[in-house]
Amino acid sequence: MSKQTYRVCLCFRRKFRLTASEVPEEIKSLFGKYSGGGFMTADQLRKFLIEVQGEENATMEDAHEIIDRLREQRHLGVFHRKGGVTLEAFFWYLFGDMNPPLPPKHGVHQDMNAPLSHYFIYTGHNSYLTGNQISSDCSDVPIIDALKRGVRVIELDIWPNSDKSDVHVLHGRTLTTPVELIKCLKSIREYAFAASEYPVVITLEDHLTADLQAKVAEMITRTFGDVLFAPDSECLKEFPSPESLKKRVIISTKPPKEYLEAKEVTENELDVQKVKDAGRDEEAWGKEVSSLKGDIEVDDKDDLDVDDKDDEDRDDDVNKLNQKAVPEYKRLIAIHAGKSKGGFDTCLCVDSEKARRISLSEQKLEKAIITHGKQVVRFTQRNMLRVYPKGMRIDSSNYNPLIGWSHGAQMVAFNMQGHGRSMWLMHGMFRANGGCGYIKKPEFLLKSGEDNETFDPNASLPVKTTLKVTVYMGEGWYYDFKHTHFDLYSPPDFYVRVGIAGVPADTIMKKTGIKKDDWSPSWNEVFEFPLTVLELALLRVEVHEDDLSGNDDFGGQTCLPVWEIRRGIRTVPLHDHKGERYKSVKLLMRFDFT
């Protein structure tokens, strides 16, 4: 294509969006089947909604609402003179915001009256950091952003300030600049329920002296008042339900311990250049998500103390330290974090009289599920398991969350300031259940079988259903990207990667062909995905632009919980690499379950 021809095309695209001539043939055929005389009546549209879209409860009111909303958009020539919908209007409905892949009116629809341990909870790690784990600023801004997105667990590392008169939040023993604790607490109070009315859990890593613990207790009590949930008993026998804790804030930490003096850290002690270089190997969309199976070396030792960098596990004698407990501080702790020392058999022991939380690094979890997989699942049926990123993730990258979820871990903690494929899975999972930040775990993770067997994500299981995905076409890059973003002198060459993230048997990625020189490409390709564990399956969608250099450009992504995807032809909005939705970029897709 010549430069002059390309400029003409650009001018043309500025004036016009997709028209009836660009409607996929399958959709034209469906319109012909369900319409008559060149237009579709409300009754015919209702029949289409029921039979093709799987909306069994669709009413005439629903059909008229669609027609009225289309009419409000006032597209020239999209309505027949007799009041019916033309092919163009029908296409605009299918490829518009009225037709999302997830149910728009469901909201919170799962049972929210079970104990907290029965839910996956949207969880952050080092929630106060603005960037990398070593030298970025600490601020309340990423906390606010996380809460606005629906994150329900906020982690704060609390340390004395330089003269030990006040409390700061910072990543200890690093070059991160601190932020005042009270500022973080006030921001949590203001934004806690901006996206969800279900409880917010604040996990504290406490490095304070007794007098500062008392000061923290006063700050928390004064800031949250009646919003704070403080149980009557010292230890809960069973966790309360999310429903009973609506618009409440919960504190989770270990019982008070002695202050651990932070050693002085200078820039010479840290390889700051390593932090700067860490993200250079990452593409815009990040590395491919690791396998659930992984390549983990297992030895005969069952010691949790090796290589554990989590400050929660630095205690040696809890009973001794508890003698110095500050009563008013201790009373605020609703979810007690237990020690994870002494081996997996010890830390995964279930106490019928006490519900507790333990923390394992992603590496420890991977080791635990190989040697003690059944115990991990059994432990999480009534207790909380928090998983956090390994210490080497100084660039604030993340790991495969399904490793934790498939073994019942409630709090799979992520660096929310990071991005990439792992984070897209996190975003996708918590689009479920109305985006409230709590998702009921599947029944097979909550109960043991007749012979006390537990769920094994690596087991060979029969196929429950097959998800059939049709990728019709895409649109919107012309409006959301600079016209020279992908190629200087020609339109982009897009292709789509689509697949499943789930248990190993279900996990796969496939791709369409490459459509050359087209801002609104049509693929019309069909893919089938057999699913053995539908309840843990996430649909991954990525758009790439083919580049001769081999470094393909990023063109958008999304991730959807398969168990909530609506059958039928749907508009799938795409997001950027940080998870922010584009204004215009979207795909037209069809989903069927067989």
Image (cartoon, helix red, strand yellow):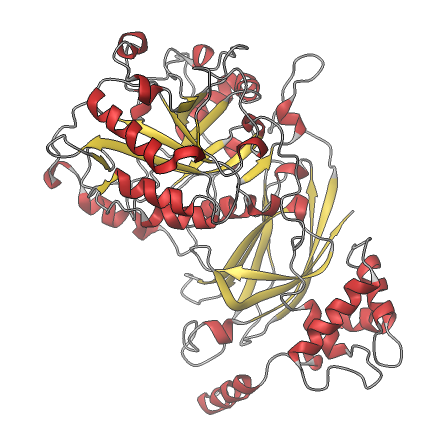
* Image quadrant where residue 306 sits: top left
Locate residue 489, reporting x and y percent: 43, 81
Locate residue 1, reporting x and y percent: 50, 85
Looking at the image, is 161 positioned above or below residue 43?
Answer: above
From the viewer's perspective, is 302 left or right of 1? left
Q: Residue at x 65, y 53 (%)?
A: 102
Looking at the image, is 246 positioned above or below residue 364?
Answer: below
* Image quadrant where residue 52 sits: bottom right
Tell me if residue 455 can be seen.
Answer: no
Locate residue 170, reporting x and y percent: 24, 38
Tell me if residue 227 can be seen.
Answer: yes
Observer-nearest of 154 and 95: 154
Q: Residue at x 83, y 64 (%)?
A: 60
From the viewer's perspective, is 45 left or right of 439? right
Looking at the image, is 547 positioned above or below residue 413?
Answer: below
* Image quadrant where residue 129 sits: top left
Observer-nearest of 45 and 283: 45
